[in-house]
Image (cartoon, coloured by chain):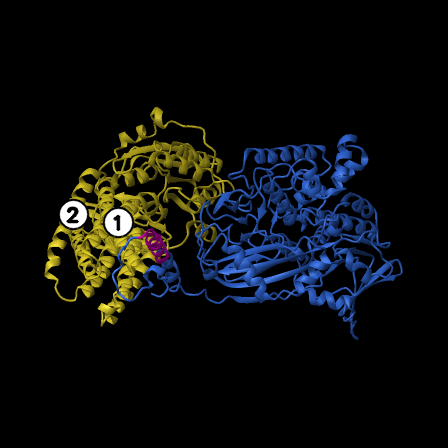
């Protein structure tokens, strides 16, 4: 009871009668005393609450150890090694390398092998599993490809995502409700922060949409970028529009918005959200070209994206299954060595002799394996952190009901995705959420240095605090938090995307070595990875004959 | 000391008025006619305060201890009054007696407070100051409470938690008094212990207030509740009034035994009587077994498979005497197989072909149920139908939820089926809609099984005509990626409940 402070007026203990019991001062103090007693109630009640149960988890084993061993030369070829002969060796088992294999098969070149550093294929699309089912560790959706993304559409037809009549399998289109945003104390439908926005700021969203519409119509942003950029370079885009596109790429997204008079904080947050989500860049980092590209690269679709519980690993694992035994995991490529007109590809366990190599690993790794190779550009790679939360039960929330993607306005994270959203049946209480966070605002190297100082406990506390804004009882719902750190998640489209892409366009590391990785575009999208994988496969197939 | 004393007078007065307002407001909410309710509650309360004042003369010794005890008691009784009244309304027939008894008890206790307090203070201050100050603060507290109640408490805390909060305040005043009058209370440990217990009780009530309110309000069904159960998936409440048995799931009426025959005959017979074959019938939802009862009227039905999510629901309808009397023991018939599974995943995972399917799910009021009203779901059901098999869907009301109804028709068409929408009048539901769908146009039956109370062969074809106010309106098909049906339904029912 000592919690309720006694007003000074009540401190008199002699019991002597007060002659004027009701002085003004006494009145004020009495009122204050009552208020203090009332305020004491919540403090008392809080004592009865139990603390949140402990959260299990840790960092997830990843391939960075193998990658660093490779970088530091700690992998050495072992004494007795198999020698294998194939027509084409593919290095890297992400969507680029898997697509290269898929394309080689389609071209009738079945004699290939794919060497993957990590224990599982999929690259950025890898996934995991727990007792609630599968969940993504990285890329988890695919926007509906435009008509010009012909290879992606062919792949989707091949995997029966698109049926004979050109319709998408409705079960794989993201189910309703899709996205929601936590703002002003509740969830709203959609991620545009338009709620309670002054008309003038709302008008800025319209102006930006109109600008993006014009850029989209120019065709210069079409993905795969090889299509859009070819248009830009060939003069198919009118000169004025082409100049506007090129000018975009000379400034950061933030500089461009400010120059357009688009200064609303909500608009900046929203554009930066897109940049962080797709390209791992802050608003003051990413090229304005990338900010526009986010919205202008595909036709405006009223449905989609395609998504699966395990994210894009649904695609990767199907391609990996087709590769069968031609896919070799835990196989870091130490060195590429000329072998007559062909190549020898060395891993610790084997040497693969081949006529052509598809390099489908990040470009920064290439010079370590191939002596003398020097890519004409060096990308800045964004680090990412992805966490999987295992929940005992869904937490409390307010507003628009649970959706596939939940975003928290103003948060440094990208929010979370509910891995079981596409389930058709009744959902059990246990769920997996994938929490995404791109480390932005500094160079990739600085970001990785900072990441090394962060313990798992730091991430646990950061994630719980982040989600507690929308779900106050999240701490009581979380059972595990597993954290995966992607040191080099994706190449960043900093200003200068166009000159970098031009420099990479016709670059070949060596005769018979073809680059089949999204790094050849300078930003990481499935369409780009797949495009380069397919192009490299076609180059390799021509060489093989 | 002085200021503290008068602050407690202020709080006591506020608490007393709040209990009175809570009782009046609750009685108005639940019984209607707020003039009568407030008038009788206030009258009873003031009278009881008079009784309390009169009784105060019989308290001679230990005035301070009694005063504190009364504070604690009024805090507990007043604090829980709102919850008690809700529960009395929901689960007993004696709301009014409980209401006036509670008002009398609280009023009497509150009536004891001020006389006792004045007697305690008289020994310290001059009598004229005591009377002036006590009454001044009494009225100030009353003003504060009467403003707080409608402006802050009811909108923010609700009735149950408002009463709890002020009960808590009352108990705090009691505990505070044990400190203020400690020189007059040589043995105050047991009073303090009682105060802490009361504090914990009310604190727990306040903390769990939302849950208690839900519990109490879910009991607000029109008829006496004979069974209430929280299953893994839903809250199931069965009420009974005279001969009428009603089932509510999550507060929504599922059937009234008085007229459910209309609904279930209309759901099953127009389609099943017209079916070419009836050997194997599939029922999705409908765990009450009432549709199965209708299906089993056909001697050529060899096998009925009922897929319902909730095992407790089907278990109850297979065993509870009044329920098996209603469904004729359908769920224990040897021809019936009950599967407790989610319909979508079960159909996905199991082969099997059926001659007819009855789809009887709750209305599409949220995105989870809405998935069971999408084209992919209907395509999946179609894959489990014989080549000439039909399905029938309960499709909410074409009158109250017109666009929702026609959206379900459009969805079945999008799944490649030929539809035959129809409607029937079910008094406890109103005008209700159903959709038959199959590979070929529907032809009504010439004969029906015997024993029906509603349908005749001649009255079936008119069910397929829609009056102007239920006629087809443009509506999009419901899709997994864009559940327009849930939005239509939400909008249409929001308009009705306004």
**Quadrant location, the N terminus of chain A:** bottom left
Judged from this view, the residue extending furthest toward the top is: B468
Q: Position of residue A524 (x, y in %)?
A: 70, 50
Q: Is residue B361 left or right of residue B5?
A: right
Callout 2 secondary element: helix
Name which quarter of the figure residue A13 lies in: bottom left
Per the rendered image, the range of residues in magenta is A23-37
Q: Is residue B178 magenta?
A: no
Query: Which chain is yellow in the picture?
Result: B
Query: Which chain is blue in the picture?
Result: A
Say which chain tag 1 marks.
B
Q: Position of residue A530 (x, y in %)?
A: 70, 49
First in residue order: circle 1 vs circle 2: 1
Q: Which residue is mark 2?
A: B46
Q: Are marks 1 and 2 on the same chain?
A: yes
Callout 1 secondary element: helix
Q: Nearer the viewer, residue A440 or B290?
A: A440
Please report the residue visible at 23 percent of the width from the left and 55 percent of the height from the top: B78
Q: CA distance from mark 1 to mark 2?
A: 13 Å
Which label is found at residue B18?
Answer: 1
Q: Position of residue A174 (x, y in %)?
A: 54, 45
Dot 2, how many residues are within 10 Å of its Cα: few (below 14), some (14-19), or many (20+)?
some
């Amino acid at each position: 009871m000592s919690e309720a402070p006694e007003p000074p007026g009540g401190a008199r203990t002699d019991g002597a009668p007060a002659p004027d019991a009701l002085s003004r001062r006494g009145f004020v103090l009495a009122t204050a005393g009552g208020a203090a007693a009332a305020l004491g109630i919540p403090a008392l009640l809080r004592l009865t609450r139990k603390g949140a149960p402990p959260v299990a988890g840790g960092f997830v084993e990843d391939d960075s150890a193998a990658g660093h061993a490779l970088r530091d030369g700690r992998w050495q070829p072992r004494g007795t090694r198999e020698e294998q002969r194939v027509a084409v060796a593919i290095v890297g088992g992400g969507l680029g390398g898997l697509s290269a294999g898929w394309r080689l098969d389609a071209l009738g070149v079945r004699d290939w092998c794919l060497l993957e550093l990590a224990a599982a294929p999929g690259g950025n699309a890898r996934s995991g599993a727990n007792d609630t089912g599968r969940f993504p560790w990285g890329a988890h959706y695919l926007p509906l490809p435009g008509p010009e993304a012909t290879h992606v559409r062919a792949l989707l037809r091949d995997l029966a995502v698109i049926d004979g009549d050109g319709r998408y399998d409705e079960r794989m289109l993201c189910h309703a409700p899709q996205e929601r945003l936590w703002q002003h104390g509740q969830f709203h439908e959609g991620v545009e922060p338009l709620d309670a926005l002054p008309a003038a700021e709302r008008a800025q969203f319209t102006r930006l949409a109109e600008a993006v519409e014009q850029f989209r119509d120019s065709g210069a942003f079409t993905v795969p970028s090889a299509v859009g950029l070819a248009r830009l370079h060939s003069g198919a885009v009118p000169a004025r529009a082409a100049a506007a596109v090129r000018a975009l790429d000379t400034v950061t997204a933030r500089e461009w918005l400010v120059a357009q008079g688009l200064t609303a904080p909500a608009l900046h947050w929203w554009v930066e959200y897109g940049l962080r989500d797709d390209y791992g860049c802050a608003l003051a980092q990413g090229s304005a070209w990338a900010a526009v590209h986010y919205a202008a690269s595909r036709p405006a679709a009223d449905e989609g994206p395609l998504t699966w519980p395990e994210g894009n690993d649904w695609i990767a694992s199907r391609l990996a299954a087709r590769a069968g035994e031609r896919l070799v995991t835990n196989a870091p490529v130490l060195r590429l060595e000329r072998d007559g007109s062909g190549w020898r590809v060395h891993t610790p366990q084997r040497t693969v002799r081949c006529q052509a190599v598809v390099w489908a690993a990040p470009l920064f790794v290439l010079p370590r394996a191939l002596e003398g190779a020097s890519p004409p550009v060096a990308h800045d790679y964004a680090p990412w952190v992805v966490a999987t939360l295992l929940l005992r039960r869904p937490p409390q929330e307010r507003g628009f009901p649970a959706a596939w993607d939940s975003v928290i306005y103003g948060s440094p994270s990208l929010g979370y995705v509910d891995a079981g959203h596409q389930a058709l049946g009744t959902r059990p209480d246990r769920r997996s959420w994938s929490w995404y966070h791109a480390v932005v605002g500094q160079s990739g190297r600085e970001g990785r240095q900072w990441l090394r100082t962060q313990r798992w406990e730091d991430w646990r506390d950061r994630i719980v605090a982040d989600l507690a804004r929308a779900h106050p009882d999240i701490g009581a719902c979380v059972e595990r938090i597993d954290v995966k750190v992607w040191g080099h998640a994706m190449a960043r489209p900093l200003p200068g995307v166009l000159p970098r892409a031009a420099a990479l366009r016709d670059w070949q590391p060596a005769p018979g070595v073809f680059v089949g990785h999204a790094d050849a575009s300078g930003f990481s999208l499935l369409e780009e990875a797949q495009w380069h994988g397919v192009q490299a496969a076609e180059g390799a197939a021509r060489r093989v004959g | 000391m002085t200021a503290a004393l008068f602050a407690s007078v202020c709080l006591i007065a506020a608490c007393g008025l709040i209990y009175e307002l809570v009782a009046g407001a609750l009685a108005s909410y639940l019984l209607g006619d707020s003039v009568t309710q407030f008038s009788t509650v206030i009258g009873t309360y003031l009278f009881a305060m008079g009784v309390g004042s009169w009784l105060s003369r019989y308290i001679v010794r230990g005035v301070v201890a009694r005063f504190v005890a009364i504070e604690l008691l009024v805090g507990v009784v007043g604090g829980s009054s709102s919850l008690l009244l809700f529960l009395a309304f929901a689960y007993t027939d004696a709301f009014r007696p409980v209401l006036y008894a509670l008002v009398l008890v609280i009023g009497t206790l509150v009536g004891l407070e001020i006389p006792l307090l004045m007697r305690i203070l008289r020994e310290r201050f001059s009598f004229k100051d005591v009377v002036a100050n006590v009454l001044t603060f009494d009225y100030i507290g009353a003003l504060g409470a009467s403003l707080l109640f409608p402006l802050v408490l009811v909108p923010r805390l609700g009735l149950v938690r408002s009463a709890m909060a002020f009960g808590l305040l009352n108990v705090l005043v009691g505990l505070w008094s044990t400190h203020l009058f400690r020189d007059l209370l040589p043995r105050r440990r047991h009073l303090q212990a009682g105060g802490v217990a009361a504090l914990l009780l009310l604190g727990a009530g306040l903390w769990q207030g939302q849950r208690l309110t839900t519990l109490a309000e879910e009991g607000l069904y029109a008829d006496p509740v004979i069974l209430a159960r929280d299953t893994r998936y839903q809250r199931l409440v069965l009420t009974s009034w005279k001969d009428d048995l009603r089932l509510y799931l999550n507060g929504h009426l599922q059937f009234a035994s008085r007229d459910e025959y209309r609904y279930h005959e209309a759901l099953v017979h127009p389609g099943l009587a017209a079916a070419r074959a009836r050997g194997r019938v599939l029922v999705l939802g409908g765990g009450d077994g009432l549709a199965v009862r209708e299906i089993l009227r056909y001697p050529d039905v060899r096998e009925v498979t009922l897929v319902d999510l909730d095992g407790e629901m089907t278990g109850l309808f297979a065993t509870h005497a009044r329920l098996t009397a209603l469904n004729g023991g359908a769920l224990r018939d040897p021809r019936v197989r009950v599967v407790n599974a989610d319909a979508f995943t079960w159909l996905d995972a199991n082969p099997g072909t059926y001659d007819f399917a009855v789809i009887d799910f709750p209305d599409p009021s949220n995105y989870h149920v809405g998935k069971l009203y999408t084209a992919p779901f209907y395509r999946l059901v179609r894959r489990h139908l014989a080549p000439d098999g039909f399905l029938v869907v309960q499709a909410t009301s074409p009158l109250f939820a017109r666009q929702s109804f026609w959206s379900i028709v459009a969805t079945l068409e999008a799944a490649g089926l030929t539809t035959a929408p129809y409607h029937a009048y079910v008094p406890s539901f109103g005008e209700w809609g159903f959709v038959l769908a199959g590979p070929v146009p529907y032809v009504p039956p010439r004969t029906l099984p015997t024993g029906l109370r509603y349908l005749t062969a001649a009255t079936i074809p008119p069910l397929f005509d829609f009056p102007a106010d239920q006629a087809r309106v443009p509506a999009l098909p419901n899709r997994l990626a864009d559940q327009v049906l849930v939005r239509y339904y939400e909008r249409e029912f929001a308009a009705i409940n306004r």
